[in-house]
Image (cartoon, grey):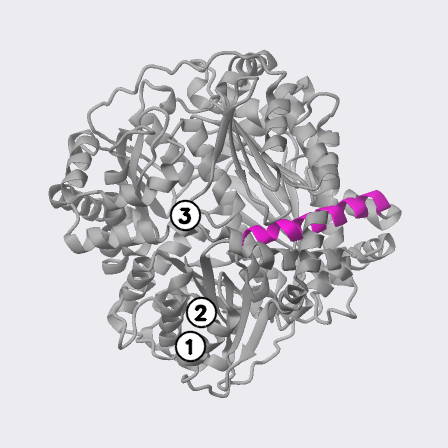
Amino acid sequence: MRMKHLLALFLAPWLLSAALANPFETTLKNGLRVIVKEDRRAPTVVQMVWYRIGSMDEVDGASGVAHVLEHMMFKGTPTVGPGEFNKLVAAAGGKDNAFTSRDYTAYFQQVPREQLAEMMRLEADRMRHLTVDPKEFEQEIKVVMEERRMRTDDNPQSRLFEQMNAVAFQAHPYRRPIIGWMNDLENMSAADAKAWYDQWYVPNNAYVVIVGDVDHREVFALAEKYYGALEGRALPARKPQVEPAQDGTRRVNVKAPAELPVLIMGYKAPVLHDVDKDVDPYALQMLAAILDGHDAARFNKKLVREDKVALSVGIDYDATARGPGMIYLHGTPAEGKTVADLEAALRSEIVRIQKEGVSEAELKRARAQLVASEIYKLDSMFGQAMEIGQTESVGISYTKLERMLERLQKVTAAEVQSVARKYFIDDTLTVGVLEPQPLDNAPRRPAVATRH
Amino acid sequence: MKIAMKKLLTATIALLATQMALAGVNIQHWVAPSGARVYFVESRVLPMLDVQVDFAAGSMFDPRGKSGTAALTRATLDLGAGNRDETAISEQLADIGAALAGSADTDRASVSIRTLSAPEKRTVAIDILRQIVQAPRFDPAVVERERGRTVSALKEAMTRPDAIAGKTFWATLYPAHPYGQQATPESVAALTREDLLAHHARYYTASNASITLVGDISRAEAEAIAETLTNQLPKGEAAALPAAPVVASGKTVAVAHPASQAHIMIGLPAIERGNPDFFPLLVGNYTLGGGGFVSRLMKEVRDKRGYAYSVYSYFQPLRQTGPFQIGLQTKRSQAREAIKVTREVLDGFLKSGPSDEELAAAKANLTGSFPLRLDSNKKILDNVAVIGFYGLPLDWLDRYQDNIRAVTPDAIKQAFARRVRTADLMTVTVAAD
């Protein structure tokens, strides 16, 4: 930290307490939480409304309804006509969109700061007063089917990922794609979407995250004014639907028009529940950073650059989720190499950590990247709002974010080695392989978070 | 300790907030002794620095028959430079938490770095960037490996309907201009290290470079960085442009593909950077297909008929005449109907332009959203780098809102009539029945 900044702090000690309280939070009587992070860098603000409802709350036969409802949320209320929501945001100089994930559904607007009140008015209106018009639904469901064709049916990697999850999970709803199976979309009705809305869109199932050039006291007053009158309602009980233990490797192959094969190896892994007591999710995050955190990290250096067994390779792990976790190794074999070669190479990198552990230098490097990324993330208000919203979505308070970072930085080499031994085991492994097919075959048909 | 630092930083942000509350961006511009043009925006709020070096070294300068030269040169540029091999570069960057980025497009080859501004971090980052820009190794083994990876990626792309549509679209619009010359597995496989060295020697020169710096450094520090990044580069001369694209008359190109959705692109070569038609086209296109969820195309194609998830139109001004493009994807069996609706929307717009209400809405959004274009260092960097690279006026951002307000309905109609001539429109479909 530079001297100048320190000096400025001593000259204005009253600022310190204010800044330490940032973000600020209040809960309205109807149960709606409002979290405000003041960031005065530029005269703009982002509002996000997060609903604790995602595709994992759907039931068989109605897959995709969370996402379809997200689309319908732009189709009007008694006071705001169909398509008017977008028009009003645009008139305010804003951008808006929404996204649905397994765990949550969220809506956002980025606007000049003067327009925040109008955005809050609009979001409050559609929180309880949505019209699900059958005529609008009839057109919009076609749009969602086109979205599925584009994102999944015509995208070989997405289809592989969809199939992987359908095999890796058997009881837990993570087995269903967020966008929904095509046949479920074909048989969905406006009444299904309306029922979903009526059941889940209430202030006590939502929270608002606002980051930008605002005074939190003014925002709290606006929140009371616009959201305060909405009535809360008791929510239905949610069944845990715990995934039974997996006892043996599962394999799934997908054929699709493509040139290159793809391999995904997904291992069941824990997610963070107790920020202070859990150890393994932090250790898995550091393991991922050591394997794939930069271009000369183990995976790319050994498998792409030195041994040339892969064209590309990576690792994905989300330490937070409402449902069960997985850690995915994935890659594409280099020309002349097979999927089996790549699988063996990925396994040998895991075995290397299981046997020899990781070095202090590697951990130090991963920590340096973490520290820098904490500064870089302040360059984006949207990113800061996303971080708060996603953390809250799994039931972890945003006030724990610093503690999570601290825990991450304290991960030891022994802990990394321990999770490598504990979770990379064949019995909980699911292997997915994309088998490329020539283009001139018979016609066939293109998830992660989807967007409105 | 590190946590405490973060809290201090938050306090600092609150303190400095008042200094930020002004519109526009103060761009300082000078020419470095090396001859490189420099654009600097001092931003002290966050302890970080972004530096981008742009060379007029994009694919438009690929020699005939050697398509892919610019892309492969850029892809291998940062994989070993000076006394650092590719591993040293990656590890040292990771050690200081810095990251490289950049790529080559039709016009530009860009290298950028994001680093913390603390001197012990920044110095390492700048030294790495200096070597990458001035002394890339193009190690033979690295070139061979990256060439192979590029060939594989191109083969994969040629199976994807969206990639095929994009490549076919550019090839159809620019049959005789380098913008239409696409890298193929064959053209890339034939490239040699000498091709890359020649491209680098010719185009990665000081006269051909613009440098953009945004962040927590002083003017004097920015001057020193710009000079150190370029003082070992040959002065060279500004790149000579190929002959301007010649517009051919419109036609339809259909590519067969087994995908479930047809990919449709409609357009033609339309406008170059710096042309005064830019603002009338920008404002007009907002109503046609640029205004996200509120455009006419979105209303007719998506909202009313459910034909597509995504439908858009935009102008992409380039160094030479860049394209106007409409794009959408729809179930393959309804491609013809979707094209018909799209053309009706376009023709209607060309005939009468936006209504008064639509024009007012376009202006309200484009001027009102201006602060959102500049609310992060990254966005400022992107905007200023474009201004620098294309030689736009330094007050381009300051005058942006006024230029939008000044657009008249007649100006829109006339600019569209000049730039979007229906007889010249190309239509490309992939996987349409």
The kind of residue on which mark 3 rests is Arg
- Dominant secondary structure, magenta: helix
In this view, the residue in front, B209 or B156, is B209
Q: Is residue A104 left or right of residue A362?
A: left
Instruction: Find the magenta span and give its range.
Output: A358-380
- Image quadrant of residue A142? bottom left
Residue depicted at 43% across the width and 86% down the height: A231
The reply to whether label 2 and label 3 mark residues of one chain is yes
Q: Count of labels shown?
A: 3
* Contact (Cβ within 8 Å) of mark 2 with mark 1: yes
Task: State whether residue B331 appears in this view.
Answer: no
Residue underneath mark 1: A196
Q: Which residue is mark 2?
A: A66
What is the spatial separation of the Cα atoms under label 2 and label 3, in whole angstroms? 27 Å
The answer to whether residue B367 is above or below residue A73 is above
Q: Is residue A219 left or right of residue A410?
A: left
Query: For numbered disc 1, what is the local secondary structure?
Result: helix
Q: Residue furthest left?
A: B351
Look at mark 3 in the image and give the residue it sits on.
Answer: A444
Q: Secondary structure at mark 2?
A: helix
Q: Is residue A90 magenta?
A: no
Q: Residue at x 36, y 77 (%)?
A: A194
Query: Residue B155 at x, y = what percent?
Result: 50, 31
Image position, residue A307 (x, y; %): 73, 31
Amino acid on which disc 1 is placed: Trp
